[in-house]
């Protein structure tokens, strides 16, 4: 049969798992937008979308919101994304005809693309492009009653290869601590948003940290090539990647980056392996019609062409991380932590009701949901959910330039007790009346030692470094 090479009937469980879990990641992404977009990017947000749309044309930022933007219209489209992604998680989309399932997956991709392209600095993360590229490929997988198309599974593995191999290369080329195996002396403590086990990981013996780095290099620089090997080698490679990503999920909060990488790894597993874990009955498979096969081949040719740019980037001397070479976020390059910060700084915001404040005034601290603040608070588990404001606060501690466009708006919102913005925080110390002044200060943070933890109960030890934003009132912000 001339089309035998096109089909992958032994990977129907892999397709089902990828579709269900990818739908779950979409669901988290759209819920994040529902909960956080309006105070950050809405009509009265910190970086308002209407202002961005007025300066950015459709070619620069393709988005449905060029047709119309209002907070209410955004909410309608975001909730449409929630409902459509929930339908994929529940398997309802798999019961639709081929063309209808492609429409639902295409709608998810289009809606999220429209959000990312107007998301500005709040959506400038590699996992946004990763979700869009994986979501685009999922359009062509077909529902459960059809035979999985092998080219789409190959492209999912090619995407996983770029995620892992790109990250491995950028580490070797970037920070010397990855080459001398000392990167994890610092990383668990200085990563953007530590989790509840990060302190334990940080206090592991230095020899184990070196073992972690060696294992990371092997997983990211060698194992990705085995994904394309015959079975059972590909199964083994996928299991290694899943174990490594699970380890990373335990050691920190990286939104849905690790979860989505695990989703992609399932594309390498055949039914012989997955059937032992999921002994479920599968419907009889039927080949898809010719128009679908032609569409898959055309899409595959497009992705091969787009693959030129990430390959050139990986092979070039000046490799960059997390770059989209087109506005559709297809054929991207990926990578993470090409440099490791040695010292952790945090921007701490507090306020006072005093009319003429000084250091002796009653300053009350705002507490964020995920980022370190109160030294006695254990770092929470947030991932695979994404706290966009908390992440940007970490970048601001590295360089003030990350906050120039929105820190003044944040201070003004706190001085007004803006309800929508305060919903992004864990604790508002001024629930009745807004403060008269707010300020931001820079602190050095480090994990407490075992002795300090026993003596004080604190997870962190912090030391004041300098003022970040001096005390300002609502009059000053005007």
Image (cartoon, grey):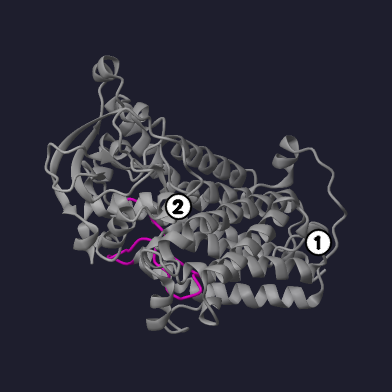
Mark earlier in primary sequence (1, 2): 1
Q: Is residue 329 magenta?
A: yes
Residue found at the very far right of the displayed protein: 284
Main SS, magenta residues: loop
Q: Which mark is residue 146?
A: 1
Q: Residues within 10 Å of mark 1 (few under 14, many from 20)?
A: many
Quarter in which the C terminus is drawn: bottom left
Figure label count? 2
Q: Which residue is mark 2?
A: 164
Q: Which mark is residue 232?
A: none
Range of residues picked out in magenta: 316-337
Residue 81 drawn above or below residue 266: below
Q: Position of residue 328 (x, y in %)?
A: 51, 74
Left or right: where does residue 184 sit relative to residue 227?
left
Quarter in which the N terminus is drawn: bottom right
Cα distance, mark 1 to mark 2? 30 Å
Is residue 333 visible from the viewing direction of this image?
no
């Amino acid at each position: 049969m001339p089309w035998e090479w096109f089909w992958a009937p032994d990977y129907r469980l892999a397709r089902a798992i990828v579709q269900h879990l990818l739908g779950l990641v979409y669901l988290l992404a759209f819920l994040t937008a529902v909960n956080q977009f309006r105070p950050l990017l809405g009509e009265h947000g910190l970086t308002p979308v209407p202002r961005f749309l007025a300066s950015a044309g459709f070619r620069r930022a393709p988005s449905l919101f060029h047709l119309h933007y209002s907070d209410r219209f955004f909410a309608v489209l975001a909730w449409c994304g929630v409902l459509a992604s929930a339908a994929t998680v529940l398997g309802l989309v798999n019961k639709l005809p081929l063309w209808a399932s492609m429409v639902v997956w295409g709608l998810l991709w289009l809606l999220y693309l429209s959000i990312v392209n107007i998301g500005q600095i709040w959506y400038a993360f590699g996992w946004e492009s990763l979700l869009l590229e994986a979501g685009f490929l999922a359009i062509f997988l077909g529902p459960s009653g059809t035979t999985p198309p092998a080219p789409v599974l190959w492209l999912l593995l090619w995407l996983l290869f770029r995620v892992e191999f790109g990250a491995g290369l950028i580490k070797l080329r970037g920070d010397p601590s990855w080459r001398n195996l000392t990167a994890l002396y610092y990383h668990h403590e200085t990563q953007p948003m530590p989790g509840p086990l990060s302190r334990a990981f940080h206090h592991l013996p230095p020899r184990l940290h070196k073992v972690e780095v060696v294992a990371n290099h092997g997983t990211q620089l060698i194992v990705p090539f085995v994904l394309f090997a015959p079975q059972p080698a590909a199964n083994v490679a996928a299991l290694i990647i899943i174990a490594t990503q699970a380890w990373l999920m335990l050691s920190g909060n990286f939104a849905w980056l690790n979860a989505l990488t695990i989703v992609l790894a399932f594309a390498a597993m055949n039914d012989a392996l997955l059937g032992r874990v999921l002994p479920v009955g599968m419907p009889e498979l039927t080949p898809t019609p010719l128009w679908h096969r032609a569409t898959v081949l055309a899409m595959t040719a497009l992705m091969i062409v787009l693959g030129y740019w990430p390959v050139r980037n990986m092979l070039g001397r000046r490799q960059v991380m997390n770059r989209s070479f087109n506005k559709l976020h297809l054929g991207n390059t990926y990578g993470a932590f090409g440099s490791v910060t040695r010292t952790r700084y945090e921007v701490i915001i507090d306020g006072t009701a005093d009319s003429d404040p000084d250091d002796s005034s009653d300053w009350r601290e705002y507490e964020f949901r995920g980022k370190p603040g109160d030294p006695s608070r254990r770092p929470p588990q947030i991932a695979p959910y994404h706290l966009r404001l908390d992440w940007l606060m970490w970048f601001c501690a590295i360089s003030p330039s990350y906050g120039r466009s929105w820190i003044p708006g944040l201070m003004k919102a706190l001085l007004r007790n803006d309800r929508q913005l305060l919903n992004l925080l864990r604790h508002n110390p001024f629930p009745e009346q807004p403060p008269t002044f707010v300020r931001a200060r820079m602190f050095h943070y480090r994990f407490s030692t075992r002795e300090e933890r026993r003596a004080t109960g604190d997870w962190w030890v912090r030391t004041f470094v300098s003022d970040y934003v001096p005390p300002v009132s609502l009059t000053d912000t005007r």
